[in-house]
Image (spheres, rainbow, N blue to C red):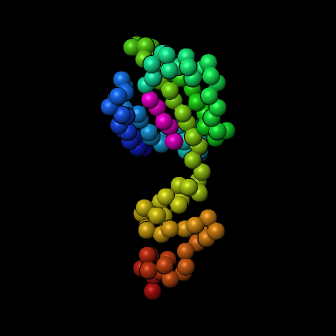
Amino acid sequence: MIYIQYVSASSESTFPQETLFYYRPNNDFQIDLVYCKEIALNELITELSYNYLYSNEIFVFYFQHPYNQRIYHVACEMISHSAIVQHLNLNVFGIDLSQSDQQPPLETINVTLNFT
């Protein structure tokens, strides 16, 4: 399942939206956050000529659609499994675990799971 979030760009932009979604290829266990936006040719030339540097965790490439010739800037960032677990714990169960805490207090688990 892919969750897609559309992010509105500023009103000055020629291109109306950016797209963010999580993706996991069928043959890979790693989950990526994919960021995609349409860019103009002059933006592509600027980015390539100035050799913008990105973090080692981010893979950036450009894609030209074969039918309409639009150009897209695509960035993929690997999401750690611990970040996913923290997100799920916080948003599903309301449990906020910090990096130093490996598990919530036992009474929190008992209340959440209704153990007696």
- Report the residue at 42% width, 17% height from top: 70
Q: Which residues are magenta?
A: 33-37
Looking at the picture, tell me which residue is in the foreground, 55 or 87: 55
Of residue 29 and residue 21, the one placed in the foreground of this image is 21
Q: Outermost residue, right direction? A: 56
Question: Is 115 located above or below residue 81 in the figure?
Answer: below
Residue 64 at least partly seen: no
Q: Quadrant of the C terminus?
A: bottom left
Let me know if residue 57 is in the magenta part: no
Residue extending farthest left:
11
Q: Position of residue 55 (x, y in %)?
A: 64, 39
Compared to residue 98, the image places residue 77 above or below, namely above
* Image location (x, y in percent) of residue 42: 49, 16
Where residue 12 sits, quadrant-wise, is: top left
Nearer-the-camera pick, 18 or 68: 18
> Which x, y percent locates residue 91?
42, 61
Residue found at the very far bottom of the displayed protein: 116
Say left or right for 56 vs 25: right
Residue 79 appearing in the image: yes
- Determine whether 80 is above or below 59 in the image: below
Q: What residue appears at the point 59 percent right and 57 percent down from the top-left corner?
A: 82
The N terminus - image quarter:
top left
Residue 81's place in the image compared with 55, above or below, is below
Question: Residue sitting at 45 percent across and 19 percent down?
Answer: 40
- Secondary structure character of the magenta stretch overall: strand
Q: Quadrant of residue 93?
A: bottom left
Residue 77 is situated, as x and y percent measured from the top left of the image, at 57, 40
Q: Is residue 116 left or right of residue 61?
A: left
The tally of labels here is 0
